[in-house]
Image (cartoon, helix red, strand yellow):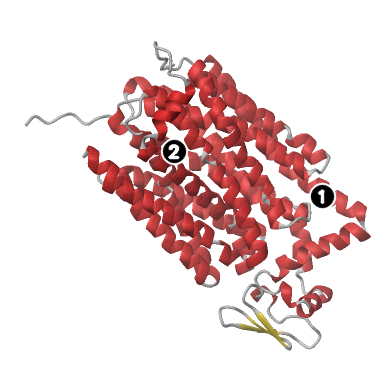
Amino acid sequence: MQNRPPVPVVPKQYLLPFIVTTCCFSLWGFANDFTNPLVKVFEQVFIIGTSQASWLQFAFYTGYFCMAIPAALFIRKYSYKAAIILGLTLYGVGALITIPASLTATFWVFCLASYVITYGLAFLETSCNPYILAMGPPETATQRLNLAQAFNPIGSLTGMAVATFLLAPALQVGEFRAELGQNNPAYTQYLISDSSKLPEGATLTGETVSLADGNTVTFYKNGVPTFADELPGALDGAVPDALKTLRFTEPDKFAALQQADLGFVRTPYMVIAGVVFTFLIIFSVSKLPLFKREEQDAPFFTVTGHLLKKAHFREGVLAQGFYVGAQIMCWTFIIHYGMEQVGLDLATAQKWNIAAMIIFLCSRFICTFLLRFISPGKLLFIFSLAGLGFTIGAIYLPGYTGLTCLVLISACMSLMFPTIYGIALKDLKEEETKLGSAYLIMAIVGGAVLTKLQGGLIESYGVRTSFWLPAACFVLIALFGYRTYQLHESKTA
């Protein structure tokens, strides 16, 4: 039997287009992961609850749902390149909307900016993902997409780094929070008199607080805690009321604080707008393959009907919605978990988020290698069960141990988006791939719906209990992985 040469992941003729297109993966990674910590920032700056602040994520991920199908129709009429150019334009315009949002100190205008940004991201993701799949042989399509997606976390890490090392330390609301916790008698007396502000699972007996992990904190008779740093979440719970008092008693001082912090939020958006418009120029002048079909695509509803008859596609769209929901929930509320369960400040909690993204990035390259030996469905099943295990650890294990489990979920999630995407679009015709890609991008709305739902669960039941929601998502993704390698992959083996 003659040995066949290895099938290339990226053929030489597509190397430059692959590199240029892969840059877009980093651009939407930045937008995703700079937005996540803003939920906590806006909670404090606008003095709103977690559920209301989660409207920012809802607006962000709903944009994908609204614009994915129009993006697919645009691609069908024009080309992948034209869709990328339009996507970059909308991305840049959305970033510029943060200027009036910050100057007017209006939360809902920030939501509008996020919504418009994801109009652009919907065009980018609906075009770039199938564009990458088309840049080479079908046998290596899933590997190629995993490789391109591996650069998405670079943009995510940049967004997180900006939020951690530039934004968080500069926020005046962070300084206000720190001053509040420096043995302020009014603050500590408030903690003792209002047991509802104690950490989740803690009880108050006289001057002693019993924590959920079995430790206790004893107070001096004057009401000042001996170990204030051992009260995770207590300080975080006191900040909103203290800010409301400042807004009522010293409105000018509060307005100055708010404007300063919103100015810090605005600056990274201005920088990313400049970067996006630069890439817009690069794509406009670059010669890229169009992959235009000579024959006309079948009607929209005809193609949709064909897609819905394919079980691996239907299940893939549902699995993608649950995956994106789990990812956004874990990355958005890791900050809440760190601040409320471990007692970290915003910048330190965000550093744990960066650690999660570094693990995510490394794991994605590892998964690209593992896919050479293990089928996508089987690997997805294994990683989903591991993600479920770490999520349960985050729910039940105390303090830093639980936070570490929450971070390690990212190692399991790294495989999921591109693998589900590749499985769902496997063996589809080109006209089906264009529209199928749009439905998979629409599934990103799971990040909007589930994150908003978890925000409500946090307010009602606490941050630990809320993580049963992503746990359920991993169960459903595992079921999809199991069905893939037992049914769909076995048919083509």
Q: Is residue 462 above or below residue 52?
A: below
State the image coordinates of residue 393 (x, y, percent, origin top left): 47, 67
Q: Left of 2 or right of it: where is 380?
A: right
Task: For mark 1, give the secondary structure.
Answer: helix
Asked if the residue under mark 1 is in contact with the one under mark 2, i.e. CB atoms within 8 Å, the reply is no
Q: Left of 366 or right of it: where is 355?
A: right
Q: Is residue 288 above or below residue 179?
A: above
Amino acid, disc 2: Gln
Q: Is residue 371 above or below residue 479?
A: above
- Return the residue nearer the eye: 380 or 277: 380
Residue picked out by circle 1:
258
Which residue is drawn at the image coordinates 62% and 48% (left, top)? 36
- Return the residue nearer the eye: 208 or 72: 72
Lower position in the chain sequence, tag 2 or tag 1:
2
* Label 2, label 1: how far apart the Cα atoms are: 37 Å
State the image coordinates of residue 359 (x, y, percent, origin top left): 45, 52
Q: Quadrant of residue 475?
A: bottom left
State the image coordinates of residue 445 (x, y, percent, origin top left): 56, 42
Q: Residue furthest top?
A: 294
Residue picked out by circle 2:
149
Amino acid, disc 1: Gln
Task: For mark 2, give the secondary structure.
Answer: helix
Q: Left of 82 or right of it: where is 46?
A: right
State the image coordinates of residue 259 (x, y, percent, origin top left): 82, 46
Please rate how many residues cluster around mark 1, counting C-alpha atoms within 10 Å: few if below 14, some from 14 to 19, many from 20: many
Tell me the quarter of the image containing the N terminus.
top left
